[in-house]
Image: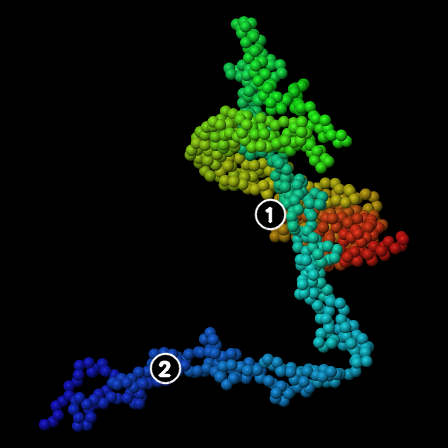
Amino acid sequence: FPPAPCKAEAGSAASTSRRGRMPGGGCDERVDVDECVEGTDSCHIDAICQNTPRSYKCICKSGYAGDGKHCKDVDECEREDNAGCVHECVNIPGNYRCTCYDGFRLAHDGHNCLDLDECAEGNGGCQQTCVNMMGSYECFCREGFFLSDNQHTCIQRPEETCAVNNGGCDSKCHDAATGVHCSCPMGFMLQPDRKTCKDIDECRLSNGGCDHICRNTVGSFECSCKKGYKLLINERSCQDIDECSFDRTCDHLCINTPGSFQCLCNKGYTLYGLTHCGDVDECSINRGGCRFGCVNTPGSYQCTCPAGCKLHWNKKDCTGISGPGGLPPRAGDARARPGRFPADPAGSSPAASCNLNCLRQKVEKKLKAALKALKKSINQERFLLRFAGMEYEVARKLGAAPERQESCGPGQQRLAAKCVSCSQGTYYHGQTEQCVPCPPGTYQEKEGQLSCDLCPRSDAFGPVGATNITGCTGQCPPGQHSADGFQPCQPCPRGSYQPEAGRALCFPCGGGLSTKHEGALSFQDCDTKVQCSPGHYYNTSVHRCIRCALGTYQPDFRQNYCVACPGNTTTDFDGSTSVAQCKNRQCGGELGEYTGYIESPNYPGNYPANVECTWNINPPPKRKILIVVPEIFLPSEDECGDVLVMRKNSSPSSITTYETCQTYERPIAFTARSRKLWINFKTSEANSARGFQIPYVTYDEDYEQLVEDIVRDGRLYASENHQEILKDKKLIKAFFDVLAHPQNYFKYTEKHKEMLPRSFIKLLRSKVSSFLRPYK
């Protein structure tokens, strides 16, 4: 029978291999077809075809990446390790190779690079000496030869002599038996070619010996100091400048600090313009805390009371001076002022309804009260005498003074052979002749007093040596009040506040405003309708924030006042937020002294806007003017809105000596081109800066040649040290003294009086000596 036909198995259509039968075989005998051999695979050209039973698979060759049907060359050189190459990596299809820089060869591992010794082959092409170097080589010539331009051939030198081209030396040349010998001046070093001189950077070694800053110069170096320090005459060491030793550094107190200084003001004054002190108008600060009137005084202020009232012990509240029912004070009221009593208490005249017995009883009562007050004063050693409307303190009889020692007198004690007033918080004790601390329950605000003042409630409690009434115990704290300012106290009711202790009343918020709670401490606790920012104050009448007016400022939020600028200062604009915006506008004037200063207003603080100053320097007869501008700070970004000009007179066409509208920190000195000078400084409202303080001196016209010779010498300004001399107030004074009186030069050059650095003295010596020689 013929073989039965074969049936296809289920799923055979999805197979990627072909089936067949062996000749004479049955259906179960199938043959696998190798697609890789027949070339029927779909593998990429850079892939390997691998036959599998009934199928095949494609694998990308090494150096390629992909799924086999799509393969892409891998750039091994892009790896972080540069494919392991030490120098350069070159990518090739399916691989990479390493190469080396010139002067190196590839090692056997195909990655490392080894130095190629060029000198080992043909002496590197050098005619005489070849020296191998890492990655390169260099040719050298023997003594008597020099290398030609091709860097390989050596040419014999002609016989050298200093007479020809200085022997090839940069600096000094010396003929010797062995040839020319070159040498270098101080500050230079001879190089290996024995010809060239190279500058020595002295600053690289121990900072050149400079304390602060070392600056290398050609053939030398220069030491300089940080701002606030000066270079000593050894021109190496730096010393702090004691700015407090200068005139006019601070208006009041000056504290020197390393490299700087600090100005402080006396009590009742505030600092402005960095160094100036202006009186604080305490009355502008919430009316000084006064209940009624406030009067500002230099360094202080006083509260005033209306007629019929007197000032409270706290110096701010007011109390009535009449007794109960409006009657005159009674003798018993003396207890309100312990230690004081009327020596002759004036009683009221007996009324018609008062008989003699009644009058006797009243007098006895007054006398008992007076005796009680007298005993209390005696026990506390406090005596007052009123004469012609004036009160005098009386001390006990002083003990006998030691022999041969002058008594200091009441209110002072002897310390270190000097009479010193008793300080605040103490009083003079007559028996011991010493200053003794105030006992508890008393205080003393003044110096040199013979007794201490009693606290309003003398309960013998409190600190020893209290310096003011705030040292008394039992005062009402801020936010509370009482009739006398002492406990028991009541909190300020809603709608009022009190920021101080010991007060009798609270301040109303005003305008119908309330507070969130009782015992409010400041106006900031009042429930205002809007919150005012710095530079504004809250107006309780219109319930709006109003900008602070010119001459006032407010640094805090939610205040109901603006602070007046200190002293004679004012602000450039309204709405100021800081005392730093308060500036003195005073400037200008007639100048005729031998020396002086021209200073921008508010210096060294920023000068005010829209100000114009005019100075006139009119020197004495036969004298001329020398100006030194140490530094000047004018903003240049406002297109010369601030200008300083020095001319012969106010006419724009007159001879101009100096004009600028920019900042210059390098000093300059010059003589006036006219005998008189008209100086004008005008500012705009755009910008502001520190300004200037320019000293001047007048000199005898007979010395004009010398002065011109000095100020026109570039060496005066070339050195930073010399520039600092023109900025140092003490040294510029000495410099001016030399220019005005050349013979004084020798005073400053004496060894024990040296003030100026040696280099500066050397600059002046030749000029002054040659100028004075004809007169010797």
Q: Residue furthest left?
A: 1
Image coordinates for residue 210, horizontal then vertical, percent:
69, 59
| Residue 508 seen in the figure | no
The residue at the point 82 percent across, 46 percent down is: 623
Q: Secondary structure at mark 2?
A: strand
Q: Which residue is mark 2?
A: 60
Image coordinates for residue 416, horizontal then vertical, percent:
71, 37
| Residue 534 seen in the figure | yes
Q: Give the side of residue 467 with respect to residue 158, left or right.
A: left
Structure colour scheme:
rainbow
Which label belongs to residue 425? none
The residue at the point 60 percent across, 85 percent down is: 118
> Which residue is nearer to you in this view: 71 or 495?
495
> Which residue is nearer to you in this view: 36 or 751?
751
Residue 303 drawn above or below residue 598: above
Residue 762 drawn above or below residue 344: below
Give the quadrant of residue 440: top right
Q: CA distance from mark 1 to mark 2?
A: 75 Å
The residue at the point 61 percent across, 87 percent down is: 120
> Which residue is nearer to you in this view: 756 or 461?
461
